[in-house]
Image (cartoon, rainbow, N blue to C red):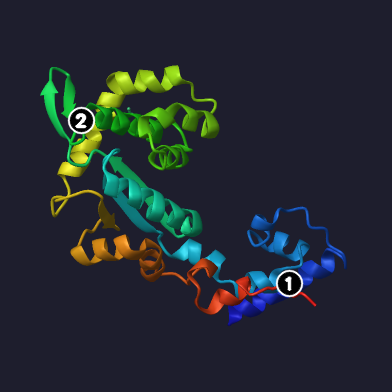
């Protein structure tokens, strides 16, 4: 209560100081990022009403990990139809880790490892390309989505990279894919996959905040979106519906 009063008072004083037509120089995404910008942009009330800003500071995002392999049909479907769309809408309250390896097997071979993949050599290559992408570019999710939603996962790689990460040359990517870096990164994926408890029995295999249960897996497969909304401990963002739904109830009527 004290805090709220102080806050409103500060806002009021600040709005007096900044005159009657404060100028808003911030993009909409930043309006609620500070008191000053909220005042300048005339949206103090809206920012106070939406607890969202505070929720992001106080509640941990829901952490979703996907263990998968690049050519497994069920993995591709989950990744493209469930995981990425959910991440686009709920990116503020969830974090995602992709671990391409799945049912592959590794054997030590000197300093390196050799890999055998469930869907053959092409799958090992796909896993390796995606592993390197995850290590080399912030746009990895977009590129992996682009590849996995294409009819030819490997064939699409080059053009997907061109679209989303033009600065990443094929040479650079392939030196990771064919070299020690990729080999070591894949070994990390193998270790991570082998460390799962319970051990994975199939892919796509999902963990939520590090936990896998049949129930969580079922919920993730039928609606990851609802699961993430349910599991987020902070106030729900507008995309989750509930009390903030009116944000999206704005119509242009034909008269
Ligand atoms: C990429 O891999 C190297 C190890 O090979 C690691 O040191 C680095 O932190 C990784 N970077 C990212 C963004 O994952």
Q: Residue 230, percent across and down?
A: 38, 71
Does 55 appear above or below 24? below
Mark 2 sits on what residue? 120
Q: Earlier in the sequence, mark 1 or mark 2?
A: 2
Q: Kindly identify which numbered label has been placed on residue 252.
A: 1
Residue at image coords 36%, 30%: 154
Would residue 176 be found to the left or right of residue 25 on screen? left
Q: Quadrant of residue 224?
A: bottom left
Camera-side residue of 41 and 218: 218
Q: Residue 113, percent across and down?
A: 17, 24
Q: Residues within 10 Å of mark 2 (few under 14, many from 20)?
A: few
Q: Residue 231, percent across and down?
A: 36, 68
In the picture, which quadrant includes the N terminus? bottom right
Camera-side residue of 119 and 28: 119
Q: Residue 174, percent across and down?
A: 38, 20
Which element is circle 1 on?
loop
Does 74 appear above or below 100? below
Would residue 23 be found to the left or right of residue 47 on screen? right
Q: Residues within 10 Å of mark 1 (few under 14, many from 20)?
A: few
Can you name the residue that lies furthest to the bottom here?
Answer: 1
């Amino acid at each position: 209560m004290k805090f709220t009063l102080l806050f409103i008072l500060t806002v009021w004083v600040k709005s007096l100081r900044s005159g009657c037509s404060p100028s808003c120089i911030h993009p909409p995404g930043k309006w609620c990022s500070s008191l000053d910008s909220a005042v300048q942009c005339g949206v103090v009330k809206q920012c106070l009403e939406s607890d969202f800003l505070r929720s992001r500071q106080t509640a941990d995002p829901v952490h979703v990990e996907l263990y998968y392999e690049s050519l497994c049909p069920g993995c591709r479907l989950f990744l493209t139809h469930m995981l990425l769309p959910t991440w686009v809408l709920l990116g503020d309250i969830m974090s995602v880790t992709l671990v391409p390896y799945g049912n592959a097997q590794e054997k030590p071979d000197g300093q390196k490892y050799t890999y055998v993949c469930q869907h053959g050599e092409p799958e090992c290559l796909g896993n390796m390309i995606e592993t390197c992408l995850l290590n080399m570019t912030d746009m990895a999710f977009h590129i992996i989505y682009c590849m996995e939603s294409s009819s030819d996962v490997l064939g699409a790689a080059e053009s997907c990279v061109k679209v989303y990460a033009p600065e990443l040359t094929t040479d650079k990517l392939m030196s990771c894919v064919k070299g020690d870096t990729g080999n070591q990164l894949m070994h990390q994926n193998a270790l991570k996959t082998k460390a799962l408890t319970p051990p994975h029995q199939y892919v796509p295999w999902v963990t939520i905040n590090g936990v896998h249960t049949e129930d969580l897996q079922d919920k993730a497969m039928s609606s990851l979106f609802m699961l993430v909304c349910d599991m987020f401990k902070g106030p729900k963002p507008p995309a989750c519906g509930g009390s903030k739904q009116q944000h999206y109830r704005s119509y242009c009527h034909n008269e």
